[in-house]
Image: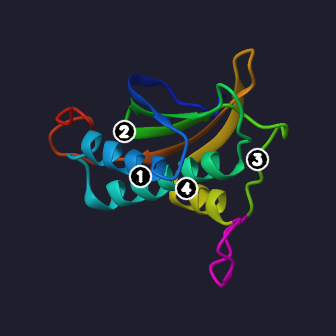
Amino acid sequence: MSLLQTVSRWKGITLERGDRASGESRRVIRRWLDDVDPLVLDDALTIVSELVTNAVRHVPPGPGRDWVTVLLGIGDAFVRLEVVDPGTAEREPRFAALDPGSLQESGRGLGLVAALSVRSGTHIAGPHGHRVVWADLDWTAPSGPPGTSGA
């Protein structure tokens, strides 16, 4: 069985990779998920912020590498957040376990993503080696699938 569950609908935006990308990604996700449980929204905002921040900090600069794409997929009782970046020389990011007692300010992001999501992972996409890091969150919304009322 594949770890990736089926997603029926997608929304996406490509942002300039820089200091403002994390805040912009949170604003977009807040708008897209305005109709979900506030706890799910909070987790989604934390996850997208961590993933975009990692893309900004760890992807080497260069011509044609100044972008990051944020995607929201709607599945059967879950939402998927994906962040796509131009990629790095390393094949896999480091998913370190989240240590709640750690005082480190760096290196905890992917552990936090894994702790907040029901499934998460990464893969390399396309011939150019773009990295996709994703996380799935369970959702509850009385009015139907999430993201149906946000623009």
The answer to whether residue 81 is above or below residue 73 is below
- How far apart marks 4 and 2 lie (CA) works out to 23 Å
- Residue designated by label 4: 50
The reply to whether dot 1 and dot 2 touch (C-beta < 8 Å) is no
Q: Residue at x 65, y 84 (%)?
A: 101
Which region of the structure is painted magenta?
97-107
- How far apart marks 3 and 4 lie (CA) works out to 13 Å
- Residue designated by label 1: 44
Decide which of tag 2 and tag 3 comes sooner along the chain.
2
The mark lying in front, picked from 4 and 2, is 4
Q: What mark, if any, has residue 77 been given in the picture?
A: 2
Q: Position of residue 110 (x, y in %)?
A: 65, 56
Decide which of tag 3 and tag 1 comes sooner along the chain.
1
Instruction: Give SS at disc 1.
Output: helix
Tell me the kind of residue under disc 3. Answer: Pro
The mark lying in front, picked from 1 and 4, is 4
The reply to whether dot 3 and dot 1 touch (C-beta < 8 Å) is no
Instruction: Give SS at disc 4.
Output: helix
Q: Residue at x 38, y 47 (%)?
A: 24
Tell me the kind of residue under disc 4. Answer: Glu
Which quarter shows the N terminus? Answer: top right
The answer to whether residue 68 is above or below residue 93 is above
The answer to whether residue 56 is above or below residue 128 is below
In the picture, measured across the screen, residue 139 lies left or right of residue 97, that is: left
Tell me the kind of residue under disc 1. Answer: Ala
Which quarter shows the C terminus? Answer: top left
- Residue designated by label 3: 93
Within the magenta stretch, is there residue 32? no
- How far apart marks 3 and 1 lie (CA) works out to 20 Å
Tell me the kind of residue under disc 2. Answer: Ala
